[in-house]
Amino acid sequence: MQLNIDLTGREVLITGSDHAARQAVRRYQAAGAIIYRLSTPKGSPQDGPLPEYPFLVAAVDDGQPGWDALLERCRANGIPVSAEPAAGPVGHVTLVGGGPGTTELLTVAAVKALRDADVVFYDRLAPYQELPSLTSGELVDVGKKPGHHKVSQSDIEKLMVESALAGNNVVRLKGGDPYVFGRGGEEVASCVAAGVPVRVISGVTSAISVPAAAGIPVTHREVSHMFTVVSGHAPLTEKEHTHLAGLGGTIVVLMGIGTLHQLAAGLRRAGMRTDMPMAVVERGYRPGQRTTIANLGTIVTAAANCTNPAVLVIGEVVRVAEANRGHAEAAADLDRLAASLMGS
């Protein structure tokens, strides 16, 4: 259940075995409810006193027979019944791709994993601001910034493994996709080495979604039939510049603000023409999203004030976005005009 009603001080009876109901109990407690428990259809001495007329019955699907009669009696007496999923098995890690930073682009599987988490280790590029509404698990900030690592990668892996071995359902929430420059492979390897079950939930990679947020398609018929995704974390070699310049298509660079000067100079030396269109898209899908468009010869000056997080796009597809921008602005003007006419 998505807890979108005020349960502060309300009596809620949660049915289901202790293991299956543990996460539902935590969610309702976090919502401020007064919790009562019924662990078996016939009750048990450990369940304690039960309310005569609870505000809500949260029925956890624990697989036990015998609950239907009780729940039907509750409904017949006008007591709302909410169906709740059972908690998953304990002691495992789920690497979750959080997309470019907005909860609207979280996958259904990502939302379910967060709902069932006991502990969430999250990055700064993940949609962490809204995590309290998505999970009742413990939230641990392990985000890294360029030149400043709050928690080292090896320590992150150690924390994940230790938490899972202690019996927790651990979610490692990362920006974008865990396997696109996200060091997800290293974290999976750490879990496997420690004997911890681990799975990966893919996310919407910023390599595609952030250009899209700026209206830039990474491929476009008769313009670009391929795209290459590059890490800009460290400067490329001259050989890599030569390969990129000769590939054609679209080049997408993640984490490239710090090495933009070297990238532009290297591609020019490798023969890429200076008037090749280029864009810097900052804070895609976030407040303050901004797009700077120039070309390979002028981008360093044009983007002098650009900051991370940002995605660089190099290629003729940038012109497609510029051509479409006028149409989009005209459509927006028509929408505003229609709204004003309807209101008058």
Image (cartoon, rainbow, N blue to C red):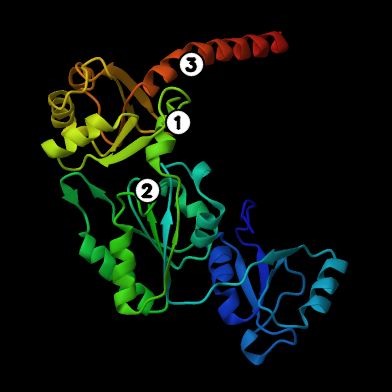
Looking at numbered disc 1 in the image, what kind of residue is underneath it? Answer: Ala
User: Disc 2 marks which residue?
Assistant: 175
Q: Check disc 1: other Cα within 10 Å, few if <14, some if 14-19, many if 20+.
A: some
User: Is residue 128 in sight in this rendering?
Assistant: yes
Residues at circles 1 and 3 in contact by the CB criterion of under 8 Å: no
Mark 3 surroundings within 10 Å by alpha-carbon count, few (fewer than 14), some (14 through 19), many (20 or more): few
Q: Where is the N terminus found, in terms of image quarters? A: bottom right
* Label 1 close to label 2 by CB (< 8 Å): no
Q: Which kind of residue does numbered mark 3 sit on?
A: Asn
Measure the C-alpha gap from mark 1 to mark 3.
Answer: 12 Å
Q: Toward the viewer: 142 or 190?
A: 190
Q: Which residue is mark 3?
A: 324
Q: CA distance from mark 3 to mark 2?
A: 28 Å
Q: Residue at x 36, y 35 (%)?
A: 227
Residue found at x 37% / y 48%: 175
Q: Residue at x 58, y 13 (%)?
A: 331
User: Could you say which is closer to the camera, residue 211 or residue 343?
Assistant: 211
Q: Is residue 182 above or below residue 278?
A: below
Q: Give the label on residue 103, or none.
A: none
Q: Is residue 220 above or below residue 117?
A: above
List the residue tagged with mark 1. Answer: 212
Q: Earlier in the sequence, mark 3 or mark 2?
A: 2
Q: Quadrant of residue 271?
A: top left
Residue visible at 64% across and 85% down?
47
| Upstream in sequence: badge 1 or badge 3 | 1
